[in-house]
Amino acid sequence: MGSRLAVRAERVFDGERFLPEGTVVLVDDGRITSVGPATGPASGPTASGPTASGPTTQKTPQKTPQETPQADQVLDFPGGTLLPGLIDAHVHLCCDSKEGALDRLADHDPTQQAQVIEAGLRRQLAAGVTAVRDLGDRNFATQDWRNREGLPKVATAGPPITIPGGHCWNMGGAVSGVKQIRDAIAERVDRGVDVVKIMGSGGINTQGTDVYSCQFSDPDLRLIVDLAHAANLPVTVHAHALAAVEQAVDAGADGIEHCTCLTPDGVRLSDRLIHKLSSRNIAVCPTIGVMPGMVPPEKIRRLLARYGLSVEARAKDAATMFAKGVRTVSGGDSGINQGKPHGVLPWSVAGLVTAGVPLVEALASATSVAADGCGFATKGRIRPGFDADLVVVDGDLPAALGRPATVIINGNIAAR
Ligand SMILES: [Zn+2]
């Protein structure tokens, strides 16, 4: 746990909006205790914090010492922007951010797998990401990494539920028939996953699967969703096919991943579907964002061209859905190849802004809205009582998000 910090920057985005100039964030024992003007009422009474437990080991370097009440250290960032630690709502920690990562993950032994997971989390943290939602691991390997000190918090789905030979079958989550569906949900409940992930259509990265069609029958998909909900688990569905998006919406899914709305005649994003998504408050994670200077692997580029997709067109569709009221959550599909490595999330946010989503809303999609969508109750906002996960960037947003000056996790400086 960290010592008592006061953090101030020229601008503060609290997860929902920019706060007035001069805002100081006080941190005690890993939690935010106060957010307000330096000498105003907000910093006084609560500055000692509800969880104060006396002096703790100092792990963070001393910055400019200045007068600020009840803090051991003051971190001052003139010209900087302070934000909540970012949240990547769609990662694959078992994937090593290199070409063919999804194909190779089954070859990793447990030691290699642990190395890949830890390396992915460290890259995420260096990019300012302090919490992730893993939407597809192998053999529940990410369960052990949910709460590691000094690393991003992890919400997990375990292996995505798919059909035999279906998208990401090699993660180990293929099911066929009612009994296997029931067993799969029971296992996820036993293991304590945070969310159930279903592969509703084929995927671009798994050979032999069909991105235009549903993988499950309507009754089977509905059964999976109902069983998960009966166990109080939210459900999010991978869906490239328009048919799979519609099927997931009708089955009562809480979230849609990708939401590409592909048909053999191209993308079909109808107002009727968008209205359904927004009126049911379904979270859409469009998984846009590619590392600057990186082009997708040749295989992926060929497939994207064949489907008539481009990175820009997908971002435009995401912006259209957002503008029409669809709850939008940012996630990178991080780890699946070199263009989408762990730490790509800042470019998912930037992609939304480029496509027309207002900056504040794009930032919220990777902080407060993502926290709500992933079930991180004390993350994604700079508020008293919330975890002291903070990131400071220098320069113009959103581009500056990609170059965090300082990342603080649980009150400790993590990376510079
Ligand atoms: Zn994915």
Image (cartoon, rainbow, N blue to C red):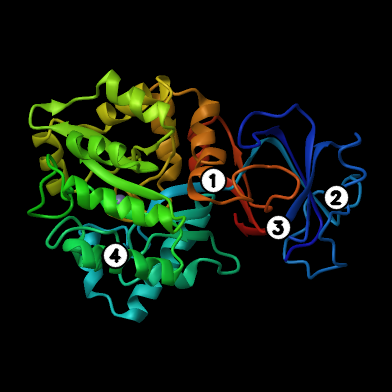
Q: Nearer the viewer, mark 4 or mark 1?
A: 4
Circles 4, 1 touching at the beta carbon (< 8 Å) = no
Circles 3, 2 touching at the beta carbon (< 8 Å) = no
Q: Earlier in the sequence, mark 4 or mark 2?
A: 2
In this figure, which residue is indicated by the disc labeled 2?
65
In this figure, which residue is indicated by the disc labeled 3?
411
In this figure, which residue is indicated by the disc labeled 1?
371
In this figure, which residue is indicated by the disc labeled 4?
182
Amino acid carrying mark 2 in the image? Pro
Is 45 displayed left or right of 214 in the figure?
A: right
Circles 1, 3 touching at the beta carbon (< 8 Å) = no
Q: Earlier in the sequence, mark 1 or mark 3?
A: 1
Q: Which of these two is toward me, 98 or 32?
A: 32
Amino acid carrying mark 1 in the image? Ala
| Image location (x, y in percent) of residue 381 | 64, 42
Tell me the SS state at disc 1.
helix
Q: Nearer the viewer, mark 4 or mark 3?
A: 4
